[in-house]
Structure formats: C-alpha cells, structure tokens
Amino acid sequence: MSILEVKNLTHTYDGNTPFMHDAVKNVSFSISKGEVIGIIGHTGSGKSTLVQHLNGLLKATEGEILLDGVNIWENKKNIRAIRSRVGLVFQYPEYQLFEDTVYRDIAFGPKNMGLSDDEIANRIYEVCDLVGIKRDYLDKSPFDLSGGEKRRVAIAGVMAMQPEIIIFDEPVAGLDPQGRANVIKMINDYSKRYNATVLIISHNMEDMALIADKLLVMNKGELAIFDTTENVFRQHERLIRMGLNVPIVTQVMLSLKQKGIDVPDNIFTVDQAVDYLLSLKQGGNRNA
Amino acid sequence: MLKDITFGQYFESKSFVHKLDPRTKLLLLLIIIILIFISKNWLSLLLVALLIFSSMIFSKIPIKMYLKNLKAVLPILIFTMIINLFYAGSTTATPKWSQNLFWNLTITDISLSRAVFMASRILLLIIVSAELTYTTTPNDLTDAIENLLSPLRFIGLKNAVHTLAMMMTIALRFIPTLIEETQKIMNAQKARGADLENGKLIERIKALIPILIPLLISSVRRAYELAEAMECRCYNGGEGRIRMKQLKYNFDDFFTFLIVFIVGATIIAINIIL
Amino acid sequence: MNNIIEVKNVTFEYDDADRKDIILKDFCLDIKRGSFTVILGHNGSGKSTLAKLLNGLYKPTEGNVFVDGISTVDEKNEIEIKRRVGLVFQNPDNQLVASIVEDDVAFGPENLGHSPDVIRNEVDDALKAVDMYDFRKSTPHRLSGGQKQRIAIAGIIAMKPDCIVLDEPTAMLDPKGRAEIISTIKKLNSEKGITVVLITHFMEEAVDADRVIVMDDGKIVADSTPKDIFSNISLLKQVGLDVPQTTELLYRLKQGGMNITTDVISIEESAQKIYDAIHLEEI
C-alpha cells in the first residue's frame, strides 16, 4: 500500500505574495513505504514547490495529499504533527542552526513534538550513533564546526524527529567529495534503519543512479516521467529535451554504441560499466 | 505586502513627470507640502489641488493606483475628520448653523467646513507623496538625496552624506534577498515543528529566536563578504568616486519649477490679501 | 615582464583569538601573463587564502606577492593592484552592491574616478563580454545564480583588469549556471587575453586550462598540464578532489587490465579511448 499519495496537485503562483515559487500543474503520483525516490528537473521546474506541499508548508491551490490514506489537511491543527512524520531538509540546512550547542540544536525538532526529555536524549544519541556524530561534539557550538559537519548536524536535527518520510532538497550541494559521501551514507543508513521513505531533489544524475529506486522527472511544473531509475535513464533523448541528462557514464556508453560497439542500454553506474566493458574485453579475447 | 515596501511603488512609464530630474521632484514635493500647510483658505487649497491634479495627469499613473493607496490611509482620514468635526477650536466667529448630537458634542457649519478642509489637506499630501514614489525609482531618490545633501561637505560632512547614500543603496539591494532568506529560515524551522502561529505573546516572541539568530548570523556573513567584494572593486569611501549616471537639470525642470513658484506666489498673495 | 603575478616565499598565518593557524608556509607561485591556470584543492586546502593574497586583500605574514612587479604590501598601490587583479567570489549575491545591473557593474569604474562617458563604455563592454547586456536594466534579485555570477564578473571586467582570479565561482550554481560561467571565463581568456586563475574543486573545469596546480594542506602537490595531472588519478583522489565519472571509468578499466590512459575528460574522447582499447585487444 502506498504511504504517500499525491492527487492532482496544482499550485498557481498568485503574484500577490512577495515570495516566488514556481507553479505546479496537476501532479499525481504515489510512493510505497521504503522507496528511495529521486526528483530531477532543471531550476524552475517546480521541484521545490512540489516537496513543500508534502509536509504542508505550502497549501495546494487544487488537489490533495494523502499520508497513509488520510488527507494531511483533514485536521488543520494537526499539520505540525504531519511535519514530524514528513521531514524536510532544505538546501544548505546549516543556515538554520541557531542553538548554542549541537545537542540543543538537534533537540529542537523532537522538543517541538512534545517528547519527554529522556525520549529526546535517547533519540539524539540514536541519531548521532547512526550518522556518525561523535558524542563529544554534542556540547560544542554548531558554529565552531566545519561546513560538512554543520550540514550533518542540521540533517540530524530533522532525522531526530524520526520521520517516516524524509525529503532532501539538494543535500550535497556545495560539499566536497568526502562531505558528499558522508551525507549520502547518512541518508542510506537512515532509510535502512527506519525503513523510511526518502525523496531527494538533485541535479546530480550520477548520485541518482547510485541511490534512487525511482525517478520523478519534473518539467515546467508538470510531472513528465515517474518510473524506475532504469526506465527513466533509458529515455535520454527525452531528458535532454527537458534540459536534463543521463549519468556521464551512460553518455559514454551511448557514444560507444554510436561507434558500433554493442552495449546494453541499462548501464548507469561506473561499476556496471567497468564490469561490462571488462567482460567484453575477455569475451573478445576468447573469440580471438 | 513586504515586496511593496521593497521596490517602492515605482510604476514604469515614460511620462513627463517620470522624466523630470529626481532632485526636482524631491524639492517640489517639499515645496508643495509647505504650500498645503500654509494654505489657510479654500481658494489657496484649490490652487494647490489644481497643481497636484494636473501633475497627476502628466504622470500617466492610473487613478486606481492612487485609490489603492488612499484605501490604506482611510482610517487616519476618517479619524482626522471626526476629531475636527467636534473640535470647535478657538474661532471667534459665530456659527450660522449648529446641531447638537448627544452629550455636549456639537457640529457647526464651521467645524464641518474645518473637518473637510483638514481631510482635503491630508488627501492632497498623500496623493502628492505617492506620486513621487510612483514616478521615481528608489535608486534615483537615493541619488537625489546624496546630491541635494552634498553642500553639507562644506561643513565637513562629506563622508557622512556619501556613507548614508551608500547605506541606502545597499539596503535597497539586500532587502529582497533578506526577505527571501527570512522566508527560507521560517520554512526550515517550521519543517522542524516550530509553531509560529499559535500561543501567547511571550511564546510567540520566543518562537522568533530560531529565526532571528540564523538571520542575524547570515546577515553578518553577507556584510563581511560584501565588504571584501567592495574592497576588491576598489572601493575607498566617497573620495574620488564619480558616478556614471550624472543628474542633469533640463528645460522641463526649470519650466516645472517656474509653474510651482507662480502657484506658490499666488497662494502667499491670497493669504496676505484675504 | 612575463609573469603578471609572483608569489615569493609567502607564509600566511591566521591569527585567531585562541589559536594560530598557519595556512600557507613558504609558498611560491608564478602566473604567466595571458595564461589560464586552474588551482584544484578541497575545502580548507588554503586555496581561498591564496586567492585573497593575489590581489592584496590579505597581506602575507612573511614573503611577498608581486603584481606586475609591484608588491601588494605597498599601501599606496593598494587600489591599482586591486584594479589589475580582479577577484570574483563564490556567492554571487554577496558581491553585488546596487539593485540595477548596470549601476552595479559601474561600481568599480566609479570608484576609480573615471569620467561618466568612459564608465558608460566600460560598463557596456563588460556586460557584452559576459552576454548580459540585455539585462542591464534588470534587478539582480530577479536573475538566476549563473546570471548573477556573470554580473559579478562583469563588475570586475569593467575595471579593465589584466588578471581575474575566481574563487570557486561555480560552487553554488546549478549545472546550467556552471556551464555558463566556465564558457564565459574561457571566452575572456581567449578573446580578451585576460589572465585567468580559476580556483575550484571540480576537476572537469580544468580541462581547457594551460596549467593545473593541485593544492593540499597549504602546499602545491602537483603543477603541470591537465593531461599530465589527470593521468595521476590516485593523487587527485588522495587529496580529496572530485574526479569526473569519465576519468573514474578509464581509471577503473585500466586497473582491470585494459590498455588505456586516463588523461582525457570529455565524453567523446573517453569513448574513443575505450573504443580504441577494445579494438586493439581484438586485433
């Protein structure tokens, strides 16, 4: 059964509010528990607007969002409870840190949920162990940490609420390779530990090929494609028309195909490509 | 609402009023405000009104823009009228007509006339100020202020004037950025379950801390980076700085000044004669 | 003189209240006039500090930085050095001063005290050079990240610098913005002859450079042509750099026994290399 169902979601930008967001037109999809969904689309395609509806930060002009079959706006007073079930990590989340210690900053979310101090402490230790934040960091000021560490603390702040669905908007933007690897590992560990559903907005097709089960492609506010990562990346011409692309390694494979080498169309990671090309080489040797 | 403040209320057009030098418009606004206040009788006020109405026509700003603006100040207008309606004032004239409402609140023909007169003054004041912001960009206004205040350099305030203008320029540039940032931080904290809408006053003020601290930190960081970037662009205070867009008065400005001076002189004459 | 910038035995210490950090120690570097140099390094490798030393924004604790033979320590040349070596930062938002594009670009020339007509020409030329002339009346707030960064570059170009140093100019941009900036930078180097020093941690941005310098922990660990540097993938990985997927693929194929080199980055060239390697085996 689907944990999240979006039905005919439309958001029109009325121009009266000072804050711009892109429009979303008649978007419908549903997601099952434990799936990792990548959301791709070029800037202005409505990705960010879409995800802000899923935890009720924005209210749809039309359509509805069902969480476990219940409309998230069914009881308006309950919307904060919804936000603890559908976690949202914004782009550059380290800019939201404000407490004087890492501990207190991570505690902000759980505290807002009305949990007891013991429960909050348990959750903080749990999330820190899970994502590799050392215990002695908890008493430090978040502002003394490095950029990559701040990012992890900020993400831990949302994870400590233990949402069933967790959404990330460009979680690795601006990080170096080590920082990126850390954050991606955090996301993987969290989703495995709690069997959580994960949605990730990213421009990086290579990361998407590694972590996403399915891809949701947004184009000009509309849902263009929603299918398995494999099936989406097979449609490279269509993606290019939308200003997107397939992973670089897949582009290399496409180029090889044009040169007359018979390569399958489901190679999206370096591992796959290496395995295939080396086997091709060995096969060639045997034939010779 | 915030965005209106940000971008002033500039209304793009190429009208006569738009093309006037911003200094002309700023100075004339001051003169017209003075004229409104020294107009003691209906005839002079009518003259000022005629001046303002004709400038409105020349500005090509749709009338509904002004009405929108007036709607916002309607409560003040009504309040002023009511106060004046019941306030007999120190006039020695005997009312020709009077009507007791209740208690000892009395409306007379004099107080009625005064109420309408005062309301008209405020109305004109608002219209003429709005016209300036409709026809002049905040940037042009900043330039005009810097230019008009520049004589202060003779009393050793040159740096102060330049600094003030630079601050206004930077503020205009960064207000939209900071509004957007505030919204982002608010959303991020709401996503962490922050409750910004409910609770007692104290709780609501406390709820602002998670928004204000990140905003403050980010503003300081921005200020620091901007200062470095400005230094890299050879900024060294106002000394030796020459603006690309030089303000220049032309015939239209002199013509407009002339008209306003004629009206002003007439009003002063009327005030003396009557 | 052939070198526009000469960094001679520079040590830079960061004096904080409670600790003293040595960012660079006995650091030397020459930048050739008209060249396109890319400096690669991960966060905290000292590359941003280096950028700020190049135009005198930071002064060396020891040693000297010369721009056209003039020392940056010399107070009276402060402005002239900043004019000759322009610096573009990571966050485009925090570099723009005015709320109208052309007014912002005019900021530098205005500070230099040029006459209004001259400034107008410099602004128009700079905006055309970054392909943003049509947006001259626009407000930065309404532009995309890549467009804002191009305005920031125009603001530097308008001062007619000899050299432009860019400190991770693409780090905050989406792929489209990144491509815009890189092609703008290349154009400025090839068409206007401006010396470019591009500091980045994206290896693929170094493909068309004349020279690539790899920094780690305040030191230069490699300094050569892109082809040469890219052949040494293990070094790049060791210093925590982003290796493009093409390079990663070639490297892994080589490790797997394929007779192939890793000195290319573009998709087309990589495919050709793999194609050749496979055919070679077949013959």
Image (cartoon, coloured by chain):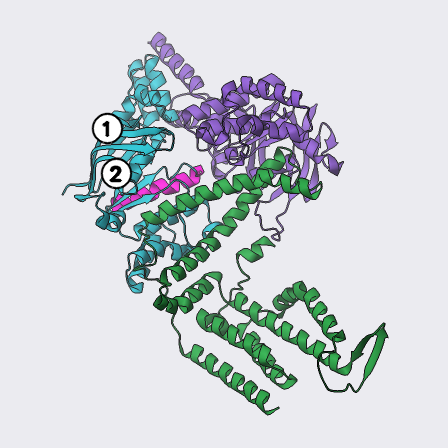
Q: Chain of mark 1?
A: C
Amino acid type, mark 1: Asp
B52 with respect to A177 (left or right): right
Q: Answer above or below: position of A273 versus B162.
A: above
Q: How many marks?
A: 2
Residue ID for mark 2: C36
Q: Is residue B204 magenta?
A: no
Position in image of residue B172 (x %, y %): 48, 55
Estimate how packed mark 1 is, as few (under 14), some (14 to 19) or many (20 or more) residues with alpha carbons within 10 Å.
Answer: some
Position in image of residue B176 (x %, y %): 51, 50
Residue ID for mark 1: C223
Taking depth in this image into account, of C184 and A220 the one nearest to the observer is C184
Say which quadrant the C terminus of chain A sits in: top left
Position in image of residue C122 (x %, y %): 30, 57
- Residue at left offset 49%, top offset 26%: A140
- Residue at left offset 59%, top offset 18%: A126
Q: Magenta stretch mostly in which secondary structure?
A: helix
Q: Is residue C133 visible?
A: yes
Position in image of residue B184 (x %, y %): 56, 41
Taking depth in this image into account, of C120 and A218 the one nearest to the observer is C120
Q: Answer above or below: position of C111 versus A208.
A: below
Tint applied to chain B in the drawing: green
A76 with respect to B257 (left or right): right
Q: Is residue A227 visible?
A: no
| Mark 1 or mark 2, whichever is nearer to me | 1
Magenta highlight range: C173-191
Q: Who's cyan, chain-wise? A: C
The residue sitting at the top extreme is: A286
Amino acid type, mark 2: Phe
Tint applied to chain A in the drawing: purple
Secondary structure state at the residue bearing disc 1: strand
Q: Which of pointers 1 and 2 lies earlier in the amino acid sequence?
A: 2
